[in-house]
Amino acid sequence: MSEELSSRARERILAAWASAVGTPPDELRRGEETIVERPDLAAVIVAEVDGHRLVAAPPIVVDTVRAAAWEALIDAHALARMLPVPAAPIGTADLLFTERRPDRPWVRVTEAGPADLRAVRTGVAESEWQESGLDEMHRAWVSWAAEGRPAAVAGFSPWHTHLAQLGVIARAEGRRAGFASAAAATAVRAAIEAGLIAQWRSRRGNDASMRLGQRLGFVRLGVQSAAALTASRP
């Protein structure tokens, strides 16, 4: 599906991910693994983006990572199990992108303030809120139910110069009613109008997130996994 993104967009996406792992984009080769040793990391970060394989790992595990099969690296649980120090999977997520503005939402959407964020947060599980990443979003918008209650929020933050990382969540009673889509569409439009490419990370197994991203016009271009080191050997 990568043909739905322009070549310029794919270049910018790859440049952002190269920056994230800490390597110049012109050193990447399609179908080859680029492994960057990162003493500042306490996690292993793996991504396959538009056919390019990128890994960032701390020195204590970099030799194990270099010897591993790609299939083990790109699965967060397999990655955590194979590391030579205790580690915990952070997760595996599909990476989707769009450079096109979605249609304007059909429900009322306004820029979100702290009270709006709190109102939505009280209607979701804390684990869902943390997964959404909305605490770190640069800007956020809220969609409103007919009775004047905040129903969903979405936002974005600039990420490695070229991308806008998206986050969205709806109150439990407002799901499957278009409120999350309305808030997310507004956030995506704002990100693209700011000159960024919108990035949607959809955790494996979160089918609702994948469906929403695709409805908004996002194109799957890769996958990411990560595992956190929970202890280090002397």
Image: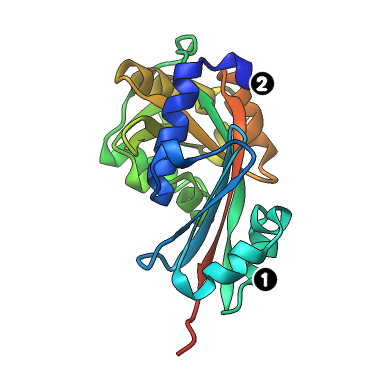
Q: Which quadrant would the C terminus be assigned to in this image?
A: bottom left
Mark 1 Cα shell of 10 Å, populated few (<14), some (14-19), many (≥20): some
Instruction: Write down the quadrant of residue 64 in the picture.
Output: bottom right
Q: What quarter of the picture does the N terminus occupy? A: top right
Residue depicted at x 40% and y 47%:
23
Outermost residue toward the bottom in this view:
234
Q: Position of residue 26 (x, y in %)?
A: 43, 36
Q: Is residue 199 above or below residue 9?
A: below
Q: Residue shown at 51%/39% (left/top)?
A: 171
Residue holding disc 2: 1
The dot on residue 19 is: none
Please give the residue where the numbered disc 1 appears in the rendered image: 82
Pick the residue in front: 116 or 189: 189
| Whether residue 144 can be seen here | no
Residue type, mark 1 in image? Met
Whether residue 31 is visible to the viewer of this picture, yes or no, is yes
Residue 113 occupies quadrant: top left
Classify mark 2: helix, strand or loop: loop
Q: Marks 2 and 1, how far apart in space? A: 32 Å
Mark 1: which secondary structure? helix
Quick one: label 2 or label 1, which is nearer the N terminus?
A: 2
Residue 189 appears left or right of 221 = left
